Image: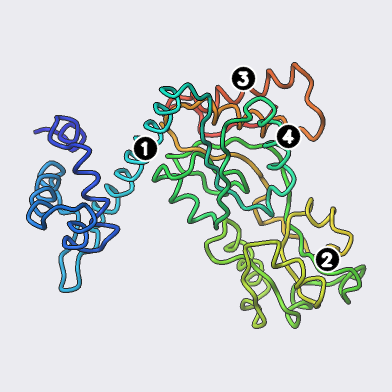
Amino acid sequence: MASTAERLLDGRVRLKHLTLVAAIAEQGSLVGAAHALNVTQPHVSRGLQEIEAAIGAPLFERGARGVIPTPQGGIFIDHAHAVLNTMRHAGARLEDYALGRTSGHVRVGVNLATVHRLLPEAILLFKQGFPHVTVSLLEEYQHALTGMLNRGEIDMIIGRLPTERADEHRYLRLLDDPLVLAVRNGHPGVGVTVTVPDLMSYPWVLPGHSSVFRGELDGLFRIHGLDQPRNLIESSTFTATKPILEQTDAIAALPQSLVDEEDMLAPLAPSLDAVPAEIGVTIKAGSVSDNARTQLIASVLDAARGTVPSPQQVADSLSLAHDFVEDADGGPSSRTLR
């Protein structure tokens, strides 16, 4: 009996089936998918039956209000999005080539507070050699970025690396930038010995629950037998967090490098050692090799050194970037900047 992988590759499943499944998932109904694709509902129903027969499992559960993905459907939908986005990216690159353009497009998922200095410096280095390549930055929580990476909607994530590493991703460690509890200069807790319980009466600004380190911060409270702060603001952007800190006695968990550069901010004594400190690049295993992406990763490596890179260091960064993106699926899952 043929395996599911063999049935997916024996010619029965075509790109039109992936487009159809993606449309059903996005619209939440067969009628909506038919309207979005400008086809009839029987056409959608027939196509769904074909793909479900090839997979050997239902992809959606039908209900009075539409359809929702089954567990198998959720898996297949993620891969369908990844394939479709890869084909769109291929089409854009082929059009550029046909028109004689040397441009390209690299899509980067970030948390800008985490890489506030590293990423701008890396982009400036990259643009010196590739001025016509578009670099798109998308700021989101880690959970959302991971989903976008899996679906092929972004090419990499640059930011704090998760403690638990996923087999479907590859990781390149750049540097350590621990979190600290930050407040305004002049805050009552600055320059004195305080503990986390001492700080619970103040307002807190924390990242949302989809952040890569929110769980560790909540664990910090639990270690002391505390619930999360009652006076709480959730914010993922330093642009909003900074004026709140400067104008109130609020407390926020911020990268140490960011606090060190802000004259109006200061760290408090309690340590956040349990929170991931590693900053790096995450890409999807098995993703299509792309020269612009590799070159941008090399520029990120150069920027992470903290000094103007020598010609040899530039060559070393490019070599490491090539090795990182070219590793086979069974190769090392993590690398480190030398």
User: Residue tagged by mark 3?
Assistant: 319
- Distance Cα–Cα, label 2 vs label 1: 48 Å
Q: Secondary structure at mark 3?
A: helix
- Distance Cα–Cα, label 3 vs label 4: 15 Å
- Give amino acid for label 2: Leu
Of callouts 3 and 4, the N-terminal one: 4
Vertical order, 201 against 172 (above or below): below
User: Residue tagged by mark 2?
Assistant: 268
- Distance Cα–Cα, label 3 vs label 2: 40 Å
- Give amino acid for label 3: Ser
- Given contact means CB atoms under 8 Å apart, are the residues at marks 3 and 4 in contact? no
Q: Secondary structure at mark 2?
A: loop
Tell me the residue at 47%/39% (across/down): 169
Of callouts 3 and 2, the N-terminal one: 2
Q: Residues within 10 Å of mark 4 (few under 14, many from 20)?
A: many
Q: In the picture provided, is 214 more to the left or to the right than 307?
A: left
Vertical order, 161 against 323 (above or below): below
In front of the other: 122 or 180: 122
- Given contact means CB atoms under 8 Å apart, are the residues at marks 4 and 1 in contact? no
Q: Quadrant of residue 239?
A: bottom right
In what quadrant of the picture does the C terminus appear? Answer: top right
User: Residue tagged by mark 1?
Assistant: 88
- Give amino acid for label 1: Arg
- Distance Cα–Cα, label 4 vs label 1: 30 Å
Q: Secondary structure at mark 1?
A: helix
In the rendered image, residue 324, in percent from the top left (x then y), is placed at: 55, 27
